[in-house]
Amino acid sequence: MDIHELLNFSTIFLLPSFLELHSIAILEALSCAVPVVASDGVGCNSEFFTNDKDGLLLDPFSKQGWAEALIHLLKEEEFRRLIGQNGAALCRSQFNIQAVAKKFERLYEELGTR
């Protein structure tokens, strides 16, 4: 069974961490429309997630906050579905290899004209 098969059985993807760069695991969960709950202020999570829109960002030191977020997601199916769909859209628009390659192409063109 590969990671996408496992994620397709998942209700929520949880990544509490104190130190993380740019998690490939988060991108894999997003690509499967699994709602992501991750640490705020860790790595670049805060730079690409909009909290309560396409993922949930929580204080990694607050156990209560994590518990409340998980309970909310489990109880509110529509909210959970919306977070998952928005996260998948974020992944397609921001982390698609073609889109990223275009951004680098534009950057190199800009740098080449200076």
Image: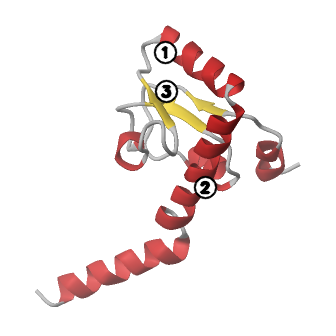
- The image's mark for residue 17 is 3
Q: Is residue 14 above or below residue 71?
A: below
Alpha-carbon distance for marks 2 and 1?
Answer: 24 Å
Q: Residues within 10 Å of mark 1 (few under 14, many from 20)?
A: some
Q: Quadrant of the C terminus?
A: bottom left
Q: Which residue is mark 2?
A: 88
Residue 55 relative to residue 34: left or right: left
Identify the residue at image location x=51%, y=45%: 54
Amino acid type for the residue under numbered disc 1:
Gly
Alpha-carbon distance for marks 1 and 3?
Answer: 14 Å
Alpha-carbon distance for marks 3 and 2?
Answer: 22 Å
- The image's mark for residue 65 is 1
Residue 15 drawn at (x, y percent): 57, 31
Q: Are marks 3 and 2 in contact (CB under 8 Å)?
A: no
> Looking at this rendering, what residue extends furthest in the left direction?
114
Residue 67 relative to residue 94: left or right: right
Q: Residues within 10 Å of mark 2 (few under 14, many from 20)?
A: many
Residue closest to the eye, 54 or 29: 54
Upstream in sequence: badge 3 or badge 2: 3
